[in-house]
Amino acid sequence: MNPQAKLIFTISLLLGTAITISSNHWIMAWAGLEINTLAILPLISKSHHPRAIEAATKYFLVQATASTLLLFSSMTNAWYTGQWDITQLTHPISCLILTSAIAMKLGLVPFHFWFPEVLQGAPLTTGLLLATVMKFPPITLFFLTSHSLNPTLLTCMAILSAALGGWMGLNQTQIRKILAFSSIAHLGWMTIIISFDPKLTLLNFYIYSLMTAATFLALNSIKAFKLTTLMTTWTKTPSLNAMLFLTLLSLAGLPPLTGFLPKWLIIQELTKQSMAPAATVISLLSLLGLFFYLRLAYCTTITLPPHTTNHMKQWHTNKPTHITIAILTTLSTMLLPISPLIYPLS
């Protein structure tokens, strides 16, 4: 892709995100989301592969439907209350339609079907944008309207997302699809707490984005797309593979690592809100995700499996790891000890 075109699309992405997260009026928020959607489409389809074109088409159709629902929700609210302010969403039908629209934007169950397919068709760097940057504006709208939304509906969607994200990821061999289902499961954790402590949702999103960025950039550096190719990359960059192993365990939420922090705080808050059964169920469902993260980690570093693969081992390279990956993997694994400082900042 032409560097100038790529620069324009990147600036448009940043502009659309900035417009949505800083707006008070529904029309401005909608315009920012549309700019975002139109800017990411060329980045998804830049390889001109039929799979990439299919992914871009699916993404466009889903996002256009979600934007239409969002606009319809805000217009319904304005019709009944005369308010266009994002924080003044009070009409129950508008709240229900908005929940559906944002769930579709994010890929929450039951509107999740598009996300694994789109992520599988996009390049790894674009996949990183889809899993992190593109979710920030809808999460912000969730944050601003959290006091108006139905907590029971959000809790049901969150538990279903955690269950389906873990369950569907078990049998996958494509790394991008595994990370897509991982994203759906993490969104379940963010959604379950948003009615009770919205700042905790944002903290969870920031830490999730950090860990996902480290994982995607490491995979992009070693050019691994399937589990079979991931099995043979330990000969190429052993140190990077070791850090990828720790980052994957952090994504799973194991205690000594950064990923445990949001899960710990969410379970604590749910217990305070007398929602111990929901906390227990979502904690047990995270074990499904732990299985496929351990499978990825096993393929990354521990050992080669007993059966042979059709891929030749890659040459060891002395090319230094990019400083961004080094910083992100360090943050993805070592932030838990300073959690008393991080939580008040959120």
Image: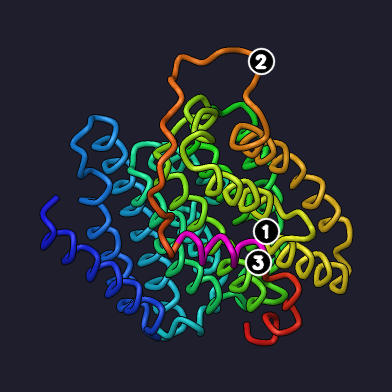
Residue 215 at x, y = what percent?
52, 51
- Residue bearing mark 2: 306
Q: CA distance from mark 1 to mark 2?
A: 36 Å
Residue at 80% across / 72% down in the picture? 269
Residue at 54% across / 74% down in the picture? 91
Answer few, some or many: residues within 10 Å of disc 1's Cα (few below 14, many 20 plus, some between 14 and 19). Answer: many
Does residue 292 appear left or right of residue 119 in this picture?
right
Answer few, some or many: residues within 10 Å of disc 2's Cα (few below 14, many 20 plus, some between 14 and 19). Answer: few
Mark closer to the observer (1, 3): 1
Q: At numbered mark 2, what does the secondary structure look like: helix, strand or loop?
A: loop
Q: Quadrant of the C terminus?
A: bottom right
Q: At numbered mark 1, what does the secondary structure look like: helix, strand or loop?
A: helix
- Residue bearing mark 1: 189
259, 236: nearer the viewer: 236
Question: Amino acid type of disc 3?
Answer: Asn
Q: CA distance from mark 3 to mark 2?
A: 50 Å
Residue 133 colored in magenta in the image: no
Question: In the rendered structure, which disc, 3 or 2, sits on the residue that comes first in sequence?
Answer: 3
